[in-house]
Amino acid sequence: MADHVASEGSPSPEDGARPEPASTPAKTDAPTKGTRASAPSKGTGTRTRRIKRPPRSRRIAVQAPEDLHVAAALIVAHNRARRIAATVRAARAIPGVDLVLVVDDASTDNTQELARKAGAVVVRHSHFRGRTASIETGASVIAMRDEAGAKPRSILLLPGSIGHHAVGAAPLVAAVTEQVADLAVARAEGEPRVEGASSKAARRAVHQATNWTPEEPLAPIRCLTREALEASIPLARGSGLEVGMILDVLKAGLTVTEVECALGHVPRSATQGGGRAKLTRYRDVMVAINARRVRDSVGGVGRRAKRQSSSSADAPTAGTDAAPSQPKDDQ
């Protein structure tokens, strides 16, 4: 549309009046650009064709699926003031995560204040309790925040030291929420697998139990459903938590997968520490493995004994009649 310039003494376009043309244009078959063709008077034999305007584009309101927000990030932190804020912000940016919970395990610095300012819900232990107890505390708080009658949130386990690389764990959330697996374990993209004694023992134990050999059975970054978490409770202590969780989930008939994630060069728990730390880690892993072997063997013996007792109860006792005995008063 051509711009109108109001001259002094003439009505402006805002007044509703149309400025007079300077001269009468020559009569042509088509209307001059910028002017409107006058409507023909009634009674004339000319026909007017009404040009249909294309329909206006309508915005279609796309509703998000009901299960879009179905995961919670659970971060265990102890004296992680340097990276906790970056970890929380990166976790909040993961698609599908609508709750970030930080369990401050008796930090002596301002970890909880920085986590809360970054947008996390913070729960604090008054004294140091360890990673396993912190995960159990966080899982209980997340369960209380789940809506009644709705599907429970899946839980993404993150260390407080991962920083902005936490957003690389997004494929784990997608694998669990899209029902690819009940437990998704992160493999660091581009990093070789850990070949320590603890990792080898964990791989061997999982393979013997299920004929499946994981690459990183001790990887701490993982996402799992509420059902998989309940199958793992009580959680194994110390460094045996991860392999114990895998064995428990597979024992319950659920599925486990490994997903490559861009996590940077984040130190993995299976490689941290010196000689004493490695011995402690190996001890925790073997305790978790042996505890589950004993449990399974005892459970197998109990099931066999129960089947034998039920089969013997169905058969009649030797030297007795199959007919039911009469009450004493009738004898």
Image (spheres, rainbow, N blue to C red):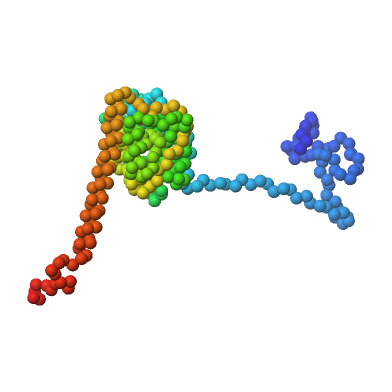
Q: Residue furthest bottom?
A: 330
Q: Tell me what residue is drawn at x 20 percent, y 63 percent.
A: 313
Please give left or right for residue 91 compared with residue 35 in the image: left
Q: Is residue 263 above or below residue 25?
A: above
Q: Tell me what residue is drawn at x 25 percent, y 49 percent.
A: 299
Residue 92 occupies quadrant: top left
- For the C terminus, the quadrant is bottom left
Nearer-the-camera pick, 211 or 63: 211
Nearer-the-camera pick, 47 or 202: 202
Point out residue 272 in the picture as x, y percentages from the top left corner: 35, 26
- For the N terminus, the quadrant is top right
Q: Tell me what residue is drawn at x 41 percent, y 49 percent.
A: 150
Task: Say if residue 104 shows up in the picture.
Answer: no
Point out residue 90 in the picture as x, y percentages from the top left corner: 46, 32
Nearer-the-camera pick, 16 or 228: 228
Task: Say if residue 221 shows up in the picture.
Answer: yes
